[in-house]
Amino acid sequence: MNKDGCHNERKTGGYHCHRAKSPVIPSIPQQRIYNGSEKSISNRWCASKGGISEFRTKDGTYVDCLTDIYAVEAEFDNKWKEAIGQSLHYAESTNKRAAILFIKRQNSRKDYYSEMERVINRYKLPITVFLTNQ
């Protein structure tokens, strides 16, 4: 149980609170959470969407960001292949829609986004992609 009296429900994969009606997401100054890492970018993006960071699924895996609609896997551009599989797994585990937070690295020279989109479109994968820069 966290400081707000909330926790993940292992059997159902849900999230609920005992002392409060809804979880409280603390406001953290941007300079403390932003260091360019995947986790800091994911946490900042997730908080901006009102999501839950590092949500534990019924399978014991962790969704980078769970919103009311999406189970989001955050990944740097060069790891897009991993993001496809993880996002689909998280969607199935949470009964949400699959999504990827595609983080374009500052020094990336290759167009990984087009590669990923080509695969998603070719196989008609039910994945929504959100794009952000490092």
Image (cartoon, rainbow, N blue to C red):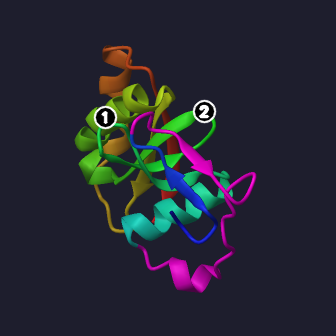
Q: Nearer the viewer, residue 87 or 77?
A: 87
Quadrant of the rendering where the C terminus is positioned = bottom left
Q: Is residue 115 visible?
A: no
SS category of the residue bearing label 1: helix
Magenta segment: 11-36
Image position, residue 94 (x, y; %): 45, 32
Mark sitting earlier along the chain (1/2):
2
**Residue type marked 1:** Ile
Q: Nearer the viewer, mark 1 or mark 2?
A: 2
State whether residue 119 is above or below residue 76. Answer: above
Q: Nearer the viewer, residue 4 or 24?
A: 4
Q: Look at 24% across and 39% down and name the residue there.
A: 81
Q: Which residue is mark 2?
A: 69
Q: Nearer the viewer, residue 103 or 97?
A: 97
Query: How many numbered markers are drawn?
Result: 2
Choose top left, top right, bottom left or bottom right for residue 36.
bottom left
Choose top left, top right, bottom left or bottom right for residue 5.
bottom right
